[in-house]
Each structure stands twice: as structure tokens, then as C-alpha cells.
Image: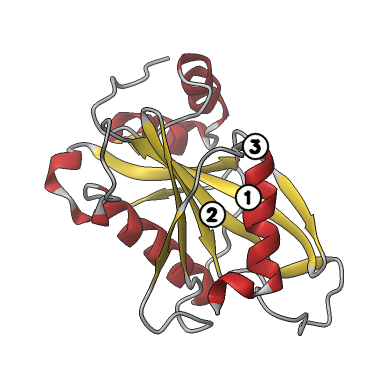
Amino acid sequence: MLEMLPGLTQIYEGWAQHYPDVQPLTIQFPGGGDDQGIDGVLAYPMEGHWLLVTFGLTELGEKTSEEKRVSGAGFEFSCRIPREAGDETVPAWILRVLHALAEQYVAGARLDVGHWIITRSPLGGEKSNGDMTSLAIVPDADMRILDTDNGLVLFFQVVGLKTEEAEYAQDADTIAPIMALLRDRDPKMLTDPNRGTIRL
């Protein structure tokens, strides 16, 4: 069973240390594996938001790579989006975003903390996401690194940016000022399409 894979169990246990009373939903993608990068997502129904953590970029089963220090790709994605009270269904658009990011990595894209991706269209192809058209990659707000039997796992939080914010990052060649202001407003850095645009 998927839940018994040692690498996934350690990711699950690592997050359980932060949120011991929250039971995540396990969302598996059909045909998961190396071809698409991730096997699925752990979705934690928090008060006011969903915490999403991917699994499959790192080694979930036995250690197979020759690099002993890191597990697989060395990172998994996390993301936080708004959640209404009592909502038990993760919006499909954010799953599409995480799936597409993993596919980009498998295809050879270099993804790391401090990078940003301009999509030119609302995130996940969801028109209601309006002018949230880009993503930034930052260290996760709660857990940056986890030491597992298969090696280290970093957690890269993806954060939605408004069009104007991404344009500023492009002109300045850095997301640091925008992310610092967003973190001051919201320490969890939710990807909330309805939030106001940050202007410097």
C-alpha cells in the first residue's frame, strides 16, 4: 500500500510533528511516477486554509539513487490556499498547478528557492483566479527540511503572485522585496487570488 512506503511515511510523520491533530487527505494522481514527477498530494484541512504537500519527487520506497545525501529530486512542493469552514474538497486548479510544476521539473526545468514562473494566464487555468498569473518559490513557512532514511528532503512552498507583482520581480530580477512584504501580511503566505496586490 502507498501509505506503507517508508519515504512517504517519513514525510507524513514529519508534518505530523507540526500538526499532530490534523489528518490529511491523500490525493493520488492516476499513473503517478517518474513520468509526471509526483504521485499525489497530502492535503491538510487547516482552519482557514488548505496545506498541500506533494509526494513522489523524492524517493518514497527504498533508496535507489546513488546520491546518498538527498532523497530523489531533493525536494517536494508545498502550497497553502484559502479554505472555507467545512470544505472537504481540494480545488482542482491547485492540483493542476502542482502537477504542471512537477512535469516542468521532470522535463528539465531548474526550480529552486528564489525562482518565479510567469504563466500569463490565471493559475491552473481557472478564470476566477483573475490576475494571479505567476508563482514564486520560497522555503516553506513551517518546515524547510526533513532528514529521512533516503536522504534530505527540502520543502519548496509555491506562492501565487499577481501580475503587477511578477512584473516588478522581473524588472528587479528578484522576488525578495515582494515576498518580504507578503510574509509580513501573512506569515503562512497563502496563495489567495482575492488578496490585494502588493505595491512597493
Relative height, residue 20 to residue 111 (above, below) = above
Question: What colour scheme has been applied to the protein in the rendered image?
Answer: secondary structure
* Amino acid at pointer 1: Phe
Mark 1 Cα-neighbour bin, 10 Å: few <14, some 14–19, many ≥20: many
Q: Amino acid at mark 2?
A: Phe
Say which residue appears at 59% left-offset and 58% top-offset. 76
Most foreground residue, 156 or 178: 156
| Image depth: mark 3 or mark 2 in front | 3
Which is more N-terminal, label 3 or label 1?
3
Name the side, left or right, on which 105 lies relative to 98.
right
Viewer-side residue, 58 vs 62: 62
Q: Which residue is mark 2?
A: 77
For label 2, the crowd category at 10 Å Cα-Cα, with few meaning under 14, some 14 to 19 and many 20 or more, is many
The N terminus sits in image quarter: bottom right
Q: Which residue is mark 3?
A: 18
Residue hosting label 1: 155
Q: Quadrant of residue 63?
A: bottom right
Q: Mark 3 belongs to which amino acid?
A: His
Query: Would residue 160 be visible to someone looking at this image?
Result: no
Element marked by disc 1: strand
Task: Of the two numbered discs 2 and 1 on the same chain, state the one appearing first in sequence.
Answer: 2
Q: Is residue 147 toward the left or the right of residue 79 in the image?
A: right
- Do the residues bearing badges 2 and 1 touch, measured as CB atoms within 8 Å? yes
Name the spot of residue 183 as percent of width and height, x first. 52, 22
Q: Secondary structure at mark 2?
A: strand
| Residue 7 vs residue 106, the one in the foreground | 7
- Which of the two marks, 1 or 3, is nearer to us in this view? 3
